[in-house]
Amino acid sequence: MSIMTLLPFIVLIGAMFLMTRSAKKKQQAAQQMRDEMQPGTGVRTIGGMYATVKEIHEETVLLEVAPGVHAIYAKNAIGAVLADEEYNRILDGADPITGEDKPVVPDDVSSLTGADEATEKGDKAGKIDLGKAEAGDDAAVDEADKAKDAEADKADKTDKADKADKADEPAAKGDAAKDGKAGDADAK
């Protein structure tokens, strides 16, 4: 057996080793986080519920999910132990602490685009039309309008021709019947 034959197996075993090693590290970090819980600490469960730790047992934790409401959870159901500042901010609904180094994300789009520009366009139609082209694209808009008008005219002509054909059919049948009767009258 050559080294080239064994190379895929060696790579596969190495990849498996690395994956299990990283998974073990994550499990150890999660276990350490759960062991560091103290009564009074704010936590988030893996289901996304925020609660306060009241008592810690070997395999379970007593959580206060609302004032006076207690629930028993397994220790491994704790997804994250939160810092006091973060937990209080989440419970109180307070604004997050913004630092100068963090970017501020606006709540609406008007601060990202020119607010004056949006209100001018909005005043004209009552709504902002996102499908309209800018003022610099007048030639493109004119060509698009002409193409739409031409299509509409063509559709109207087709509809009128279809209606006229349908209207002429009974008259043509009536004429043929009359011609047949006239032919019958000539034969007599």
Image: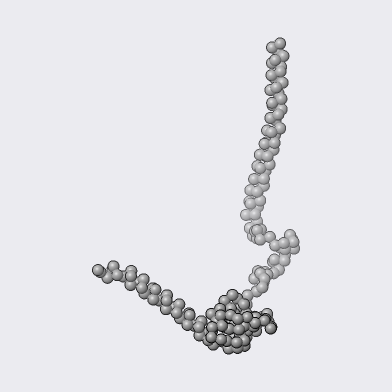
Residue 170 vertical placement versus 58 (above, below)? above
Lateral position of residue 150 relative to residue 1, left or right: right
Residue 173 quadrant: top right
Residue 80 quadrant: bottom right
Could you tell me which residue is drawn at 33 percent across and 72 percent down?
Answer: 10
Q: Which of 62 and 112 is in front in this view?
A: 62
Q: In which quarter of the image is the N terminus?
A: bottom left
Residue 121 vertical placement versus 10 (above, below)? above
Could you tell me which residue is drawn at 71 percent across and 18 percent down?
Answer: 181
Please provide percent x and percent y for residue 121: 71, 63
Residue 87 visible in the current orientation: no
Q: Which of 90 and 61 is in front in this view?
A: 61
Please provide percent x and percent y for residue 76: 53, 80
Please provide percent x and percent y for residue 50: 62, 79
Could you tell me which residue is drawn at 36 percent across and 71 percent down?
Answer: 12
Please provide percent x and percent y for residue 77: 56, 78
Q: Which of 182 and 149 is in front in this view?
A: 182
Residue 103 quadrant: bottom right
